[in-house]
């Protein structure tokens, strides 16, 4: 799941915003992955690239919904002050919103997977590949953090991806 500030949702729904810059200690997404944006719907990750913030150009900032690279860097500095201080890497995630038909199919598949898991008493995550429509157990790769890889501080709530841009 990718979380965004409400001000960006109309641009995502209209197809104007097609990328986001995220600061992570490790890469958390990969090309071809399907994800969900609350308020916008399901997306397909087109590419994920490590980027250097000082090297971003105005051309890089426009698909992210910013008129200039300086405006993008200013927003990132405000949102990710702690991550920047901790030395996290910047990743450009390019995505496309799924069509209405693909949205409906994704929702139906997710509901079917949840119903099947509930009926069988097993916990599965529905993450099909490009050709698959079957639920399967979650697999981790070198770009995905393993469960428990980040320490949880007592009394705090953590999320896998921060609410940013």
Image: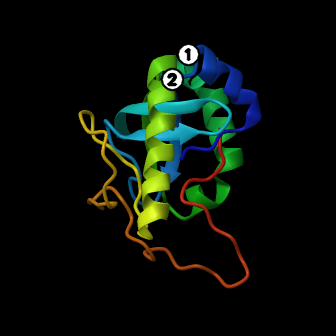
Q: Position of residue 7 (x, y in %)?
A: 76, 29
Which residue was labeled with disc 2? 18
- Quadrant location of residue 131? top left
Q: Which residue does the image show at 40% across and 61% down from the upper left?
A: 124
65 displayed left or right of 100: right
Question: Closer to the camera, 26 or 38?
Answer: 38
Towards the viewer: 133 or 34: 133
Q: Residue furthest front?
A: 119
Residue 55 seen in the current view: no
Q: Which image quadrant: the C terminus?
A: top right
Residue depicted at 47% across the width and 24% down the height? 98
- Estimate how packed mark 1 is, as few (under 14), some (14 to 19) or many (20 or more) residues with alpha carbons within 10 Å: some
Task: Please identify the residue farthest to the bottom as the structure is shown.
Answer: 154
79 shown above or below 17: below
Q: Secondary structure at mark 1?
A: loop
Q: Secondary structure at mark 2?
A: loop
Res. 15 mark: 1
Mark 1 in CB contact with mark 2 (< 8 angstroms): yes
Report if residue 69 is visible in the image. Answer: yes
Q: Residue 36: give x, y in percent of width and height.
A: 53, 40
Corner quadrant of residue 65: top right
Dot 2, how many residues are within 10 Å of its Cα: few (below 14), some (14-19), or many (20+)?
Answer: many
């Amino acid at each position: 799941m990718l979380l965004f500030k409400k001000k960006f949702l109309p641009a995502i729904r209209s197809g104007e915003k097609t990328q986001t810059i995220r600061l992570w200690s490790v890469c958390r997404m990969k090309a071809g992955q399907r994800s969900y944006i609350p308020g916008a719907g399901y997306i397909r990750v087109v590419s994920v690239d490590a980027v250097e913030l000082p090297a971003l150009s105005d051309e890089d900032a426009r698909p992210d919904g910013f008129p200039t690279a300086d405006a993008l860097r200013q927003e990132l500095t405000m949102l990710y002050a702690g991550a920047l201080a901790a030395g996290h890497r910047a990743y450009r995630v390019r995505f496309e919103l799924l069509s209405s038909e693909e949205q409906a199919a994704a929702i139906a598949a997710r509901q079917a997977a949840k119903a099947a898991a509930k009926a069988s008493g097993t916990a599965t995550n529905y993450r099909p590949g490009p050709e698959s429509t079957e639920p399967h157990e979650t697999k981790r790769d070198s770009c995905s953090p393993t469960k428990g890889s980040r320490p949880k501080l007592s009394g705090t709530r953590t999320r896998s991806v921060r609410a940013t841009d």
